[in-house]
Image: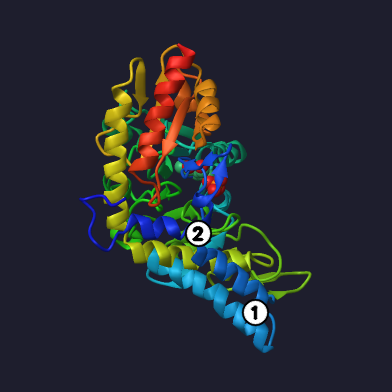
Amino acid sequence: MSNSIITSAFDIDTIRADFPLLGEQMRGKPIVFLDSAASSQKPQQVLDALDYYYKHQNANVHRGVYELSQQATDAYEQGRESARRFLNAASTEEIILVKGTTDGINLVASSFGRKYLREGDEVVISAMEHHSNIVPWQLACEQSGATLKVIPVNDKGELLMDEYEKLLTDRTKIVALVHVSNALGTINPVEEVIAKAHERGIPVLLDGAQATPHMKVDVQALDVDFYTFSGHKVFGPTGIGILYGKKKWLEDLPPYQGGGEMIATVTFEKTTYNELPHKFEAGTPDISGAVGLGVALDYIEKIGQDNIAAHENALLQSATEQLLAIDGLRIIGTADNKASVISFLIDGAHPYDVGTILDKLGIAVRTGHHCTQPLMDRFGIPGTVRASFAAYNNEDDVEQLIAGVQRAARMLL
Ligand code: PLP
């Protein structure tokens, strides 16, 4: 099924055919996969790259003089180069291969925290953070005596920018913010957030877990200090992700973990560290993960992020309008600028029950607090039902969702 507003380069049927799992059944029904915000499906190109790597190139990296190890190293470093291009970073020295967004944030919170956070300092986050951009900062604050400050959100789920500006003081050492909210879909005004922080010389980390699958991210244009995302949400494998850091910061911060790979010389008295990016990559890395991630990022770039965004926006609008026509249904997260995540509640029905009925119909959605418990508290709700769209979803998926939610409403109310 093609959507008229999409350029001819974007052919949804061709894209869907790339994802084998979309042809599978769930509960005996063709699967309608609407939980890509949790983890995306993988295209054949990524699966083939993993298969090829293990069959033909598998060896440890950066260590062997032999041909196979050099091939594995080249394949691994190619993944890094794809990530550099994807984010438009100036150099691969600024691209650290990590386990995922959580790992990227922990790295910065730990290294930055050790070097820069002291008693009385402040770290600014927002009310819509995923737990992975809350807890690492809480740990860093506990260790240093610093305090966590939280930018509040309005009823639509948008940052209160005036309050944000008031929170920036001489005590603020770093701002850590989600680029796109996984629970609300809000696209935050990150350019403005960064500009305001930089006016005061404060660095900014962005959690790009939900932004990278849906829109073009240019770290140089953003002038962001740290940017991190997960491979498994951008059609890549689990266990791999990217942390971008400006070179000046990565050179400045102490290593996160110690071990092989991250050292230059070791004696019992003193260790010197490897150059960037290896200084932050202790131990044998996820080599096949990097290979698969590189192919996944190339795949997204080939489809075109603008095409993906336009396609998903069309699905988002269509689904939003049709869901709102259902009696008693309300959407949590109605920001003016939204990505393709719809969180909703049906008055009188528990989200879990709605999700269970949809599951029986072969429709995969997420229910619960979406790892954003403080945000759910802000809205006074235990959780939501969340449908999220990726490049491979189509109008049929939206139709199935609407029919399923209508049915759940009839059954539960
Ligand atoms: N941040 C956001 C906004 C997310 O949506 C997620 C995952 O759902 C994460 C961070 C954590 O990502 P991961 O579990 O891949 O480290």
Q: Residue at x 33, y 53 (%)?
A: 215
Residue 386 percent coordinates (x, y): 45, 32
Q: Quadrant of residue 398?
A: top left
Amino acid under label 1?
His
Looking at the image, which is closer to me, 215 or 166? 215
Label 2 residue near ligand 1, CB within 8 Å: no
Residue 389 percent coordinates (x, y): 39, 43
Residue that lies at the very extreme toward the right in this rendered image = 268
Amino acid under label 2?
Ile
Q: Earlier in the sequence, mark 1 or mark 2?
A: 1
- Left or right: where does residue 172 sit relative to residue 322? right
Q: Nearer the viewer, mark 1 or mark 2?
A: 1
As drawn, the label of residue 215 is: none
Q: Residue at x 44, y 58 (%)?
A: 17
Residue 103 percent coordinates (x, y): 58, 51
- Left or right: where does residue 410 sit relative to residue 54? left
Quadrant of image for the C terminus: top left
Looking at the image, which is closer to me, 284 or 341? 341
- Residue that carries the numbered disc 2 in the rendered image: 242
Residue 142 percent coordinates (x, y): 60, 36
- Residue that carries the numbered disc 1 in the rendered image: 56
Secondary structure category for the residue under label 1: helix
Answer few, some or many: residues within 10 Å of disc 1's Cα (few below 14, many 20 plus, some between 14 and 19). few
Answer few, some or many: residues within 10 Å of disc 2's Cα (few below 14, many 20 plus, some between 14 and 19). many
User: CA separation, marks 1 and 2?
Assistant: 25 Å
